[in-house]
Image (cartoon, rainbow, N blue to C red):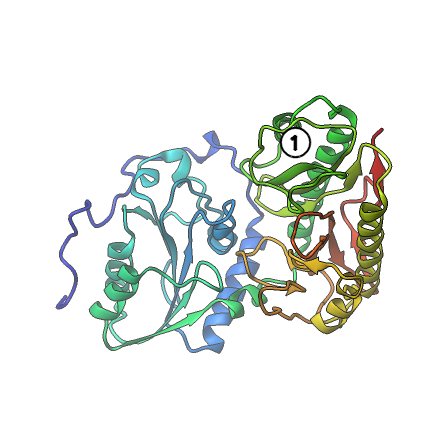
C-alpha cells in the first residue's frame, strides 16, 4: 500500500504468539459471554450513532493502572509495562488487541484477552496502520478514544495514522465513551461489591493492628497484606499517612510511606482503592484518630461528617453536579478548601465522570441513574493543605436513592485509643 511506513528500527511490525494456548491453564477473572455481548453491542451502537467505520480505543498503565479501564472493559486484557495499547474495533470484521511486544510472546498474558487476534510491538503504531490496511479502511471515518479525557494519543501514533491515511477522518472521543459505560450491569455491580468488601477489610485490619510506636511502613504493610489475603488485585491505589494533630505537616495522604513513627497524637488519612480480580475499584477510607482531637481537628472532622451526610442524602436518580456541589459547600463556608473531588466515578479512566467539587478543575457533570456507581470522598483541608481529614465510601445508585457498598464500618470518626 502506498504511503505505509517502513518497518521502524525498534523491532518487527508485529509479534504474535505462534503456538497453541490452553486457556484452561490460566485462571484469569472474566465475565460471562452475555456480558461481553452486551458491552460489544454498546460499542457497535456507539459507532453507528457516530458513523464510524472503526474505533481505536487507547489504554496504558496510567495512575495505578486506571488507564486500562476502557481496553479492559472491551477485551478483559490487563497488561504490564505497556507504554501504549489499543483495541482496534471495526464496524465489520474481528477486533484486534495491540499490546507490548513482550506480552504478546507470553501465553499467560495473551490468554487474558477474549479476542484471539493479539499482536505486540514496542510501539503499536505499526499494528494500527497495518490492521486498518487489512480491513480495507483507506478512507471513511475512524474514532479514537483517548487513554484519559485530558490526554491524547501520542504524537507518533497520530502522525502515523494521519500520514498513512490522509483520506480518513480521525475523530477523537473520550467523554462520550465513558458516559456510555456509566450504567453498570449486575455482573459489574457484583464486582464492585467484592471490591468494597476487600476495602472494608483493610480498614478493619488497620483498626485492629496499628498502634503508636509503629511506623508508616507498618500502616502500608497492614493495608497491602490485607489486600493480598483477601484476594484483591495488586497493584491498586493506596494513599495513606499519619499526622500529628498538634504539629501537622500535610493534609493529604501519601502514595508511599515516609520514615515517620505513629504517635498517640495522630490522625490517619487513608484512601484505599481496593479492587476485585476484574479490576473494579471501590474506594474507601475511614477517619481514625488515636486520641481525642483538639478543637481545630474536631472542627475539621465535624465539617467532614456533615458534608459526607449532606452529599449522600442527594444521591438519587436525577441528581446532578449542581446539587452535589451545593451539598458540599459547607466545607468552603466554614473556611476550608477542597483538594480531592467530592464525588468521582469508578472503573473509568482518571478524570472521567462524574467528577464533582474540586477546586482545581471543572466538574464533569452526569445525571445520576440507577446502577451508576460513584465514590463519595470528603477531604476538607486548611487553605495551606497542612491540616486535613478524609473519609470516603463507594455508593451504587438505586431506584430511590443510593446504597453504601462499604457497609462493614459505619461512616464516622473512630478513636483507636
The kind of secondary structure element at disc 1 is helix
**In the rendered view of the protein, which quadrant contains the C terminus?**
top right
Does 33 sit above or below residue 359? above
Does 330 sit above or below residue 86? below
Are there few (<14), some (14-19), or many (20+) residues within 10 Å of tag 1? many
Q: Quadrant of residue 262?
A: top right
Judging by the rendered image, the residue that carries numbered circle 1 is 223
Q: Nearer the viewer, residue 264 or 369?
A: 264
Q: Quadrant of residue 378?
A: bottom right
Q: Position of residue 270 (x, y in %)?
A: 68, 41
Compared across the picture, whether 180 is left or right of 205 comes to left
Q: Nearer the viewer, residue 357 or 53?
A: 357
Q: Position of residue 127 (x, y in %)?
A: 27, 55
Q: Quadrant of residue 397?
A: bottom right
Query: Which residue is found at the position 48% from the left and 68% from the top?
Result: 44
Query: Which residue is found at the position 25% from the left and 44% from the top?
Result: 15
Compared across the picture, whether 332 is left or right of 271 comes to right
Q: Position of residue 74 (x, y in %)?
A: 49, 55
Compared across the picture, whether 97 is left or right of 15 comes to right
Q: Position of residue 336 (x, y in %)?
A: 74, 59
Does 113 sit above or below residue 222? below
Amino acid at each position: 500500500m502506498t504511503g505505509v511506513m517502513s518497518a521502524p528500527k525498534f523491532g518487527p511490525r508485529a509479534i504474535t504468539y505462534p503456538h497453541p494456548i490452553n486457556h484452561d491453564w490460566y485462571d484469569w477473572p472474566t465475565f460471562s459471554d452475555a456480558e461481553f455481548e452486551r458491552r460489544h453491542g454498546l460499542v457497535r451502537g456507539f459507532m453507528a450513532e457516530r458513523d464510524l467505520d472503526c474505533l481505536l480505543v487507547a489504554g496504558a498503565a496510567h495512575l495505578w493502572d486506571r488507564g486500562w479501564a476502557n481496553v479492559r472493559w472491551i477485551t478483559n486484557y490487563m497488561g504490564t509495562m505497556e507504554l501504549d495499547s489499543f483495541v482496534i474495533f471495526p464496524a465489520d470484521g474481528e477486533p484486534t488487541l495491540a499490546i507490548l511486544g513482550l506480552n504478546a510472546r507470553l501465553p499467560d498474558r495473551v490468554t487474558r484477552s477474549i479476542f484471539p487476534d493479539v499482536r505486540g510491538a514496542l510501539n503499536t503504531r505499526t499494528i494500527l496502520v497495518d490492521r486498518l490496511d487489512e480491513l480495507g479502511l483507506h478512507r471513511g471515518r475512524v474514532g479514537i478514544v483517548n487513554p484519559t479525557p485530558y490526554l491524547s494519543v501520542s504524537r507518533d501514533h497520530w502522525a502515523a495514522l494521519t500520514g498513512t491515511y490522509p483520506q480518513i477522518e480521525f475523530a477523537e472521543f473520550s467523554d462520550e465513551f465513558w458516559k456510555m459505560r456509566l450504567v453498570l450491569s449486575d455482573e459489574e455491580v457484583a464486582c464492585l461489591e467484592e471490591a468494597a468488601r476487600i476495602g472494608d477489610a483493610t480498614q478493619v485490619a488497620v483498626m485492629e493492628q496499628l498502634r503508636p510506636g509503629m511506623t508508616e511502613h507498618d500502616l502500608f504493610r497492614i493495608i497491602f497484606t490485607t489486600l493480598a489475603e483477601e484476594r484483591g488485585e495488586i497493584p491498586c491505589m493506596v494513599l495513606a499517612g499519619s499526622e500529628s494533630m498538634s504539629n501537622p505537616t500535610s493534609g493529604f495522604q501519601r502514595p508511599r510511606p515516609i520514615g515517620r513513627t505513629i504517635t498517640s497524637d495522630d490522625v490517619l488519612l487513608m484512601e484505599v482503592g481496593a479492587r476485585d480480580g476484574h479490576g473494579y475499584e471501590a474506594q474507601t477510607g475511614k477517619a481514625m484518630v488515636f486520641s481525642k482531637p483538639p478543637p481545630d481537628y474536631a472542627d475539621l472532622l465535624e465539617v467532614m461528617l456533615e458534608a459526607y451526610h449532606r452529599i449522600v442524602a442527594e444521591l438519587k436518580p436525577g441528581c446532578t453536579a449542581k446539587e452535589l456541589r451545593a451539598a458540599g459547600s459547607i466545607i468552603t463556608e466554614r473556611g476550608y478548601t477542597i483538594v480531592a473531588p467530592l464525588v468521582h466515578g469508578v472503573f473509568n479512566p482518571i478524570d472521567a465522570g462524574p467528577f464533582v467539587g474540586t477546586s482545581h478543575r471543572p466538574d464533569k457533570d452526569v445525571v445520576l441513574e440507577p446502577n451508576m456507581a460513584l465514590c463519595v470522598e470528603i477531604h476538607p483541608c486548611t487553605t495551606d493543605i497542612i491540616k486535613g481529614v478524609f473519609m470516603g465510601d463507594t455508593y451504587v445508585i438505586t431506584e430511590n436513592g443510593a446504597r453504601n457498598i462499604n457497609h462493614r464500618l459505619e461512616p464516622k470518626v473512630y478513636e483507636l485509643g
